[in-house]
Image: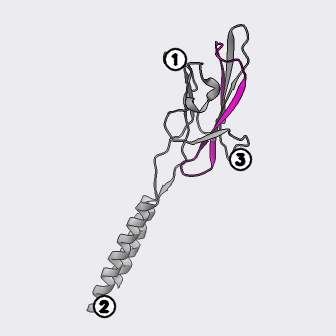
């Protein structure tokens, strides 16, 4: 019985020492815009935690006769929680050019209040979201975003350790009852 106590204490001590395992996470958001040749026109670089907004205006040759705004919401994987929002506003043509305004909002503790027109799941890596913005068709631009994925604890590590501990305890208990 004393051996079982030591085993339980050792197991709990080991779990406390190691702590829970966490899935990999990306700690920043990023917005990258390229032209048709692949040249980077804007790169926000990694936005550190707490930076809630980045924006830029890009002027291109006129490609559309209407001005429209579209919003893409990035959802936390496997949930309906809105994590980030990319808003793209195409202005009316003026003098053969059009200006496109990009606003990238990241969530904070209060959440995002703007509603998206379309949504997709964030991947934690740089992902091409150009196809969601029909208002950019004909502009030759490629829009990529990277969104920080909230780390999720890995329950399998704790469950595996607990199962092993219970199995060892049961085996010792059985052995002590036989003698």
Residue 11 x, y percent position in the rendering: 39, 69
Residue 143 x, y percent position in the rendering: 56, 27
Q: Quadrant of the C terminus?
A: bottom left
Nearest the camera: 173 or 29?
29
Is disc 3 placed on a helix, strand or loop?
Answer: loop
* Disc 1: which residue: 36
Sort mark 2 into few (<14), some (14-19) or many (20+) by Cα contacts within 10 Å.
Answer: few
Sort mark 1 into few (<14), some (14-19) or many (20+) by Cα contacts within 10 Å.
Answer: few
Disc 3 and disc 2 in contact, CB within 8 angstroms: no
Residue 51 x, y percent position in the rendering: 64, 35
Residue 58 painted magenta: yes
Which tag, 1 or 2, sits closer to the chain's start? 1
Residue beneath the point at 58% across and 35% down: 48
Which tag, 3 or 2, sits closer to the chain's start? 3
Is disc 2 placed on a helix, strand or loop?
Answer: helix
Kindly give the residue lying farthest to the left in the view shown.
179
Of circles 3 and 2, the one toward us is 3
Residue 158 x, y percent position in the rendering: 43, 64
Which tag, 1 or 3, sits closer to the chain's start? 1
Nearest the camera: 176 or 111?
111
Q: Which stretch did the figure color magenta?
A: 54-83
The label on residue 139 is none
Above or below, comparing residue 123 to residue 134 in the picture: below
* Disc 3: which residue: 110
Disc 1 and disc 2 in contact, CB within 8 angstroms: no
Is disc 1 placed on a helix, strand or loop?
Answer: loop
Q: Quadrant of the N terminus?
A: bottom left
* Disc 2: which residue: 177
Residue beneath the point at 51% across and 53% down: 152
Residue beneath the point at 70% across and 17% down: 65
Residue beneath the point at 39% across and 75% down: 8
């Amino acid at each position: 019985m004393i051996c079982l106590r030591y085993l339980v204490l050792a197991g709990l001590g080991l779990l406390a020492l190691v702590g829970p395992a966490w899935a990999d996470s990306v700690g920043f958001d990023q917005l990258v815009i390229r032209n048709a040749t692949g040249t980077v026109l804007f790169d926000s670089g990694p936005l550190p935690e707490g930076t809630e907004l980045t924006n830029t205006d890009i002027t291109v040759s006129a490609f559309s006769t209407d001005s429209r705004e579209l919003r893409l919401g990035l959802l936390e994987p496997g949930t309906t929680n809105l994590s980030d929002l990319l808003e793209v506003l195409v202005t009316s043509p003026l003098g053969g050019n059009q200006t496109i305004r990009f606003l990238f909002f990241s969530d904070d503790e209060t959440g995002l209040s703007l509603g998206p027109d379309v949504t997709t799941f964030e991947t934690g890596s740089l992902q091409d979201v150009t196809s969601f913005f029909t208002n950019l068709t004909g502009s030759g631009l490629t829009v990529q975003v990277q969104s920080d994925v909230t780390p999720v604890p890995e329950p399998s590590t704790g469950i595996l350790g607990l199962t092993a501990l219970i199995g060892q305890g049961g085996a010792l208990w059985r052995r002590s009852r036989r003698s």
